[in-house]
């Protein structure tokens, strides 16, 4: 013991730490990361800074790099000033509409997808595989491809300018069905059997076991689908003509256009503010559900 | 209370594979029966048919006085312990154990009482609020047992419950399961591929091979008078030595032209036979009549395994650790009372 320590103290100065050597590899890594981050963050930063100026400055000098003095005014106007042709819609209303669309879209997709996957995986249906592939091929037919027939149907049912018409046609989802199918197939068979012996029927098993087991999966799906629904542009533009149903994403454009048509200077500051507001909910959703992701990864539940 | 009876129970999978050939047996109340056999012998299928997880193609299955062929698993009054425990990962231990009772609509207080009693019996009381992922393998196994006990079933079904545990824990749990089953006096069916587990735990063993019952008997029956070469070589470690030989009904079996040994056999079969003898019943002896060529010694601690050749066929001896062979050509004695004679083609006992 004693001689070991003594040799160590003698040997210690010999292995001199390379104190001031620059590791170029590390510098390179960081450079790439920093450039990448700037690339992602700068447009958002510019938008935010610009949103704090009045429209004259923006019209004259373009995007702004630092705070102006119109922050409060722009955001207040963006949220509360009635706009549009009929002066019937404000930012807050559009925010509500977008939230209804995003949440309805995500929740609907998750419910339908989960139930479809449950049927396909757990019941010995005759054409389960066929049904799955039929659902799967609808991935090849996004809304844009079938937009005219979809519009025809919705219009025929008199669902234009309703939330139902806005949400329901978008719900059927091959993506969610596919992900839940893959997940359910990884749930051990014995769990189903144990539940059968425990007297849990199909509905009970779904609600008591499968849904709680899939909660991290549901969270992931919710994020993806919410953001997807939130950013819908084409379908809401088609289906809603009443300004009371406008969503944020199309409202931004409406503001700029409406004023440009009236030969005035577009309210760029307000539009920028609205863009920032439109970005917030998806960001918040991701931040909120992130803890669920981490939990799902560390808890090796399955 | 609950006797389990199978009458010509058979399983054919869609596609025509006959996983279990018509099998009949009865398990008296309170007995622990072990189904043992190699992978794919149909033992798990048989158990799953009793559980109701697998449909019965033909035959009659009754638990107690009730024919349960078409009864839902939940209503068969059984409990099953799975190899991978099959605990619900998102529920606490207490919820896991009480889930079946909750589905039966028992009042909360009663469920709690039963769960607490079972937990106490299995020493898992302190884990009742934990999730399965926070428990070790042995603890999970106990919880799975607890889930079975709280239901106070008429029949326990065990599907290789110990094969995910390490060897030491396996031995300990083996004893615990056995003691628990005795104490509760519940009939049990236990599936394993481990012949040691089968020998130590069973009141009776059912040996299966290729979907067919080879033999039903007490561990001692199975060990001392195996019904076929398959049973002889599957049960017991190291397996029984089997030597091809010929028998002409004169009380002697010829291993080669020179070597023949006397046997006791009440058969008029003449021709090809298999001569079986357990490695621990062969004796090394200076005046033994049969030459044995030693190739390899395996040290087991208490005993030694001598591997080599006898009459040109591989052959193993299990000898005490005090025996140290000095040359590689030894003489052995095959005691007449330890010899088993099997049919040369069918492998059945003669």
Image (cartoon, rainbow, N blue to C red):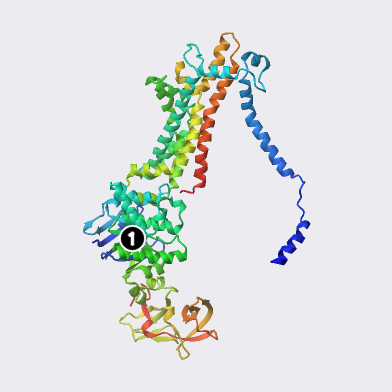
Q: How far from the left and from the top, in percent, is residue B310?
A: 47, 81
The residue where tag 1 is placed is: B20
Residue A118 in view here: yes
Residue at 52 percent across and 76 percent down: it is: B298
Crowd class of label 1 (few under 14; some 14 to 19; many from 20; radius 10 Å): many
The extreme top residue here reads A263
On screen, residue A30 versus residue A262, left or right, reads: right
Q: Picture quarter containing residue A12?
A: bottom right
Work out whether residue B268 or residue B154 is closer to the camera in this orientation and state it: B154
Residue at 23 percent across and 56 percent down: it is: B67
Residue B210 in view here: no
Work out whether residue A297 or residue A2 is closer to the camera in this orientation and state it: A2
The extreme left residue here reads B65
On screen, residue A184 versus residue A12, left or right, reads: left
Q: Chain of mark 1?
A: B
Q: How far from the left and from the top, in percent, is residue A58?
A: 64, 16
Does residue A193 sit above or below B33 in this rendering? above
On screen, residue A135 versus residue B106, left or right, reads: right
Q: Secondary structure at mark 1?
A: strand
Does residue A50 sit above or below A19 in this rendering? above
Q: How far from the left and from the top, in percent, is residue A101?
A: 45, 26
Residue at 56 percent across and 23 percent down: it is: A275
């Amino acid at each position: 013991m004693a001689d070991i320590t003594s040799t160590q103290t003698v040997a210690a100065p010999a292995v001199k730490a390379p104190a001031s050597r620059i590791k170029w590899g590390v510098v390179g890594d960081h450079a790439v990361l920093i450039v990448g981050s700037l690339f992602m963050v700068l447009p958002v930063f510019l938008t935010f800074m610009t949103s704090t100026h009045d429209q004259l400055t923006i019209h004259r000098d373009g995007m702004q790099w630092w705070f102006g003095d119109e922050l409060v005014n722009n955001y207040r106007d963006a949220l509360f000033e009635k706009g549009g042709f009929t002066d019937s819609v404000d930012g807050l209303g559009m925010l509500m509409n977008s939230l209804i669309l995003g949440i309805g879209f995500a929740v609907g997709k998750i419910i339908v997808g989960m139930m479809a996957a449950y049927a396909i995986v757990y019941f010995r249906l005759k054409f389960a595989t066929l049904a799955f592939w039929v659902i799967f091929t609808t991935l090849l037919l996004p809304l844009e491809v079938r937009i005219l027939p979809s519009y025809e149907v919705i219009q025929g049912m008199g669902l234009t300018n309703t939330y139902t018409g806005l949400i329901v046609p978008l719900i059927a989802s091959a993506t969610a069905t596919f992900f839940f199918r893959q997940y359910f197939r990884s749930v051990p068979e014995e769990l189903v059997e144990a539940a059968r012996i425990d007297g849990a029927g199909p509905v009970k098993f779904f609600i008591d076991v499968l849904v709680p087991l899939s909660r991290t999966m549901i969270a992931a799906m919710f994020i993806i689908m919410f953001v997807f629904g939130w950013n819908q542009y084409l379908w809401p533009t088609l289906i809603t003509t009443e300004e009371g149903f406008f969503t944020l994403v199309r409202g931004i454009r409406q503001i700029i256009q409406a004023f440009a048509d009236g030969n005035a200077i577009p309210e760029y500051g307000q539009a920028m503010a609205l863009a920032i507001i439109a970005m917030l909910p998806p960001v918040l959703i991701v931040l909120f559900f992130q803890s669920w992701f981490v939990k799902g990864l560390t808890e090796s539940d399955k | 209370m609950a006797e389990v009876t199978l009458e010509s129970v058979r399983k054919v999978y869609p596609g025509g594979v006959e996983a279990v050939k018509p099998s009949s047996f009865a398990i008296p109340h309170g007995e622990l029966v072990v189904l043992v056999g190699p992978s794919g012998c149909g033992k798990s299928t048989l158990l799953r048919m009793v559980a109701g997880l697998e449909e019965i193609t033909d035959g009659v299955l009754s638990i107690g006085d009730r024919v349960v062929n078409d009864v839902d698993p939940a209503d068969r009054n059984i409990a099953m312990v799975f190899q991978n425990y099959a605990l619900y990962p998102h529920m606490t231990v207490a919820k896991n154990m009480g889930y079946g009772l909750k589905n039966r609509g028992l009042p909360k207080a009663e469920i709690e009482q039963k769960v607490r009693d079972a937990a106490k019996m299995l020493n898992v009381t302190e884990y009742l609020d934990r999730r399965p992922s926070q428990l070790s393998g042995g603890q999970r196994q106990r919880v799975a047992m607890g889930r079975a006990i709280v239901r106070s079933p008429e029949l326990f079904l065990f599907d290789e419950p110990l094969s995910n545990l390490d060897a030491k824990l396996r031995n300990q749990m083996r004893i615990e399961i056995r003691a628990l089953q005795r104490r509760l006096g519940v009939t049990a069916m236990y599936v394993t591929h481990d012949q040691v587990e089968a020998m130590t735990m069973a009141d009776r063993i059912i040996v299966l091979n290729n979907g067919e019952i080879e033999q039903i008997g007490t561990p001692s029956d199975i060990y001392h008078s195996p019904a076929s070469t398959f049973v002889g070589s599957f049960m017991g470690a190291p397996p029984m030595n089997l030597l091809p030989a010929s028998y002409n009904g004169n009380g002697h079996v010829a291993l080669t032209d020179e070597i023949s040994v006397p046997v006791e056999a009440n058969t008029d079969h003449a021709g090809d036979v298999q001569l079986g003898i357990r490695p621990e019943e062969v004796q090394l002896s200076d005046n033994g009549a049969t030459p044995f060529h030693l190739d390899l010694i395996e040290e087991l601690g208490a005993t030694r395994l001598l591997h080599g050749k006898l009459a040109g066929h591989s052959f193993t001896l299990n000898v005490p650790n005090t025996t140290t062979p000095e040359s590689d050509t030894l003489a052995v004695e095959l005691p007449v009372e330890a010899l088993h004679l099997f049919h040369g083609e069918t492998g059945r006992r003669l």
